[in-house]
Image: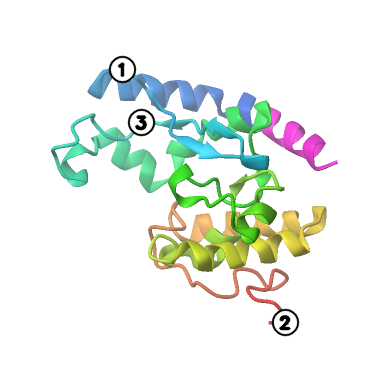
Amino acid sequence: MKRLVDLSIGGILFLVLSPLMLLIAIAIVLESGHPAFYAPVAIGQYGKPFRFLRFRTMRDDPDQPVSRRLTRVGRMIRSLSLDHLPNLYNLLMGHISLIGPRPTEPERVNLNDPDWQHILRVRPGILSYAVLVLAKDFNSTSQAERNKLELEYIKKQSLSYDVNILLASLKKWVASGGNIKARGIPTRSPADNVPTQEGD
């Protein structure tokens, strides 16, 4: 059922947003050349690696600080989280779900850890409960603390719970001006019917 919902919503979004994605890709190429996309490796369900597709936002110049590598187009689309629109391709291909644990880089994953083994039984998601709860504190939060929230989601996951997370994420996205992690969004109580901690 969840996969059917992913395909239905993902297919509609892909068709509706394709013109915007094309314009963004053209703008990236015109400003800083090819490629328009960036595809880092992430660990998916059952520990299988996949290429997590995003729009490229920086120039390939590792000797420069991030602030100088970031392009004008890249800064704009990052501010609205539009660099993640190509994730819809991963959604349609079955690499990820609409809602699920955040896709994680291989170097952060310990396949021998019981928590990770449990998390990797679930398809990762474009929208993550951990990101919704931690918001601007996500990047500074330890992987162990992130995993606690991912496990909380897995324990409670259902279609109705996913809908609540989707609606709460959209609300926070609008309130943050387009980027939940980059702005001062509260790290607690992301939605009245999506508790942030067990028992809250």
Which tag, 3 or 1, sits closer to the chain's start?
A: 1
Q: Is residue 17 left or right of residue 136?
A: right
Helix or strand or loop: what does disc 3 sit on? loop
Which region of the structure is painted magenta? 1-12
**Whole-percent x, y for residue 11 in the image:** 69, 28
Confirm whether the magenta stretch covers residue 97: no
Which tag, 2 or 1, sits closer to the chain's start?
A: 1
Question: Hey, which quadrant is residue 139 in on the image?
Answer: bottom left
| Residue nearest the observer in this picture, 178 or 86 | 86
Image position of 4 with respect to 108: above or below: above
Q: Give residue 56's mark.
A: 3
Q: Are marks 3 and 2 in contact (CB under 8 Å)?
A: no
Q: Main secondary structure of the magenta part?
A: helix
For mark 2, what is the residue? Answer: 199
For mark 1, what is the residue? Answer: 34
At 51% from the left edge and 56% from the top edge, which residue is drawn? 174
Q: Is residue 95 left or right of residue 157?
A: left
Quadrant that contains the C terminus: bottom right
